[in-house]
Structure formats: C-alpha cells, structure tokens
Amino acid sequence: MKYQNPTYVKLTDEERISGKMSRENMAQAVIGFQRDGVVILENAVDPAHCDALNKEMKDALPEVLKDPHTQWNDDVKAPLEKRCANINQRPSMKPELLFEDIWANKLGYAVLSNIMGPNACCNYINGNTALAMGAKGRQRVHADIAHTFPHTAIGVCFNFYLEDASAANGSTELWLGSARESSFRDHLACKPLKDGESAVKPQRVNLRNQNEANILHSFGVREEPLEERRKWAPPIQPTVKKGSIMLRDMRIWHAGIANPGKEARVMLCFNHTPAWYDCPTKIALPESARSKIEEWSNREDYPINFKVEYKQSEQEAKNHFGGVDLSSSNSGFWEALKDDTMPGYVLVVE
C-alpha cells in the first residue's frame, strides 16, 4: 500500500527547453519506472503544442466517429453501463503539427535509453480518446503484451497528455508494480496448445471487423491474480497534468475507464521496443513527414529509430494503418524463454 502513488518527476522549464535532464531527475525517473512500471515526467511538452494538437484532434472527432474503420476499445453493441466508450484516434500528421517535443521528445528518450539501452525503435503511433457519452463501464484489466515475456521491459509506451487527466475525465486505471511481478501465466491468453502447434504461433485478430475485434477483449488478466493483488495493491487512476509524458511498461496491468466528464479526453500513444527485439511493426506516415523524421533520426542527442513505411499522402497513411504485432522476430528471444512458461499462444493484431 505504501507504493500506490506513481513517481512524478517535476522538470524545470530549463530542462524542457534544453532537452537535458538533471542526473537527480534521471535517477528518480528510472527508479520509479522500474519499481512501478510507470513514471510521469511533468512539464515535458510545450503547453502551446498540447493545445494546438488537442484542438485539431477534437475538431476531427465527428469525422473519426463516422469512419467505419475507427477502432473502438470496447463492444459497441453493449449497454452504456458496460462500455468505456474509448476509441483509437491517430494524431494529425500535418507538417505544422509534427512538434519535436511530442514526436521526438529528448527528455523521454533520455529516460528510455537508460531503461532499454540505445537505439530503441518507435514502432507504433496512435491516440486514445475517452469519449464523453454517458458510458459508465470499463475494459477488462489487461496488459498490452499478450504473449510470453521476460522480466524486463520489452515495450514502453509514451503517453502524452494534451490536457489535464484524472478520474474526472477517464484516466487509465493502473496496477502499479504488476509489470515486474506478473508473468504470462497470469493472463487468459496463456492456454495449452493443440498437439503439434508451436508455442509462438500467432493467433491473428482483424480489428477492422468489429465482431472479430471483440475477441480481443476476451483477453486479459485472470480473476485469481487480480483479486489477490487487489488485497494489498489495488489499482489507481492517476492525476496527470497537461504537458506530461507517462512512460508505461507495456507489461503493466491496466484498463480503460469510462469518461464521466462533459468533454472528450485525448491522450497520445507512442510505443517502443528495444533495438535487439526486432519487432516487425512499422508506422505508416505521409511522405511530407520524411524530412522531420530523418532529422530526428540523425540528431546527435538521443536519435530515434523510427520504423516507418512512407505513403504519398496523410489519407493514404491513415488507410494503411494496421494493427500491432508486438511479438519478436528474434529467434534468440523465444529460445531464451522456451523453458520459462507453460505453453501458450501469441496474440497478433492485424
């Protein structure tokens, strides 16, 4: 119960503007992340950049909600009391809205390099919008990695907060410490395979088909470990200030919670894997973003290894947006884990 508050690292304006973090703040960030599975860097992004992107994404919401390809993170046919009314919404890729302190934040990548090692790969960029539509439900508690994983971070998500977030507008439920104390055995996706099946054979789910998408939400953490952990480390909904970055270990147990507020709440999600992990997922970006992406990839301080597939236009990039395969293409990864878990299967989202 003592550690049921995440670590908040309060960055100075000088640190934000220079992109250089003090050793003291770095120590707090790395230790807090390793203990809890999350750390929150406050004052990491220019508030004006947050406001500009937040307005653009909220203005786009009516069209996003009309798009049949929009991914809902719950069952759209369920009654409101069982829904979290949460969608995936990609950030605008207009050149004037590709802010470096969001797309290539030096402070975030400085911390990431101390967690994952150098040259971490950015494989996935999306946004998460909690709609204000009277829903009162929630997602099943889950982790974003639904396959055998080691006791080290193999996926770290940067959540950028474009406005203040709390339980009042549907901040994500987090089970602090679960990332380092959980294993694949705690997950519903860990199931015996049929004779002759490989323990790393993927189960593919097409998220563009809503009926199949609901299969995804049958995955999550088993009730027994949830209830046991709840006795001494119950979940929280953190309060996070606009301009913050939450670094979240993708092994941590969490759940989307309905937004009881009057306005939608937008949060961005940038996922990263270690250089050695060989994650196959690529980001579809318009050709107009190439110059900035290459500039950030070649800078001296904390270059970023973006895994990108360029398209001719922003609309084409959106149309080619697939899901996320968070498994590893590194055979050594699976070899190292072969004796570490009961047989299960990998969930790969298309």
Image (cartoon, grey):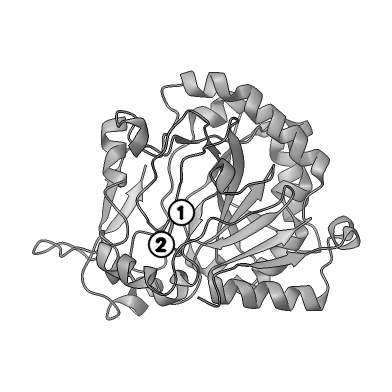
Q: What element carries label 1?
A: loop
Q: Which residue sits at x=74%, y=74%?
A: 26
**Closer to us: 327 or 214:** 214
Residue 99 percent coordinates (x, y)? 77, 42
Residue 303 seen in the figure: no
How far apart are the two marked residues, 2 and 1, measured between alpha carbons? 7 Å
The answer to whether 162 is drawn above or below residue 329 in the figure is above
Q: Is mark 2 on a helix, strand or loop?
A: loop
18 horizontally vs 42: left or right = right
**Closer to us: 230 or 177:** 230
Question: Which three-letter amino acid code belongs to the residue tagged 2?
Answer: Ser
Could you say which disc has been placed on residue 258 in the image?
none
Q: Which residue carries the number 2 mark?
A: 329
Q: Which residue sits at x=74%, y=55%?
A: 105
55 horizontally vs 153: left or right = right
The answer to whether 322 is drawn above or below residue 7 in the figure is above
Question: Which three-letter amino acid code belongs to the residue tagged 1?
Answer: Pro
Residue 118 placement: quadrant: bottom right
Looking at the image, tell me whether mark 2 or mark 1 is earlier in sequence order.
1
Q: Which residue sits at x=80%, y=58%?
A: 299
The answer to whether 91 is drawn above or below residue 326 in the figure is above
Q: Quadrant of the C terminus?
A: top left
Residue at the far right: name it.
14
Residue 336 percent coordinates (x, y)? 36, 79
342 horizontally vs 136: left or right = left
Residue 44 percent coordinates (x, y)? 77, 55
Check contact, mark 2 vs mark 1: CB within 8 A: yes
Dot 2: few (<14), some (14–19), or many (≥20) neighbours within 10 Å?
few
Q: Which residue carries the number 1 mark?
A: 280
Residue 39 percent coordinates (x, y)? 63, 66
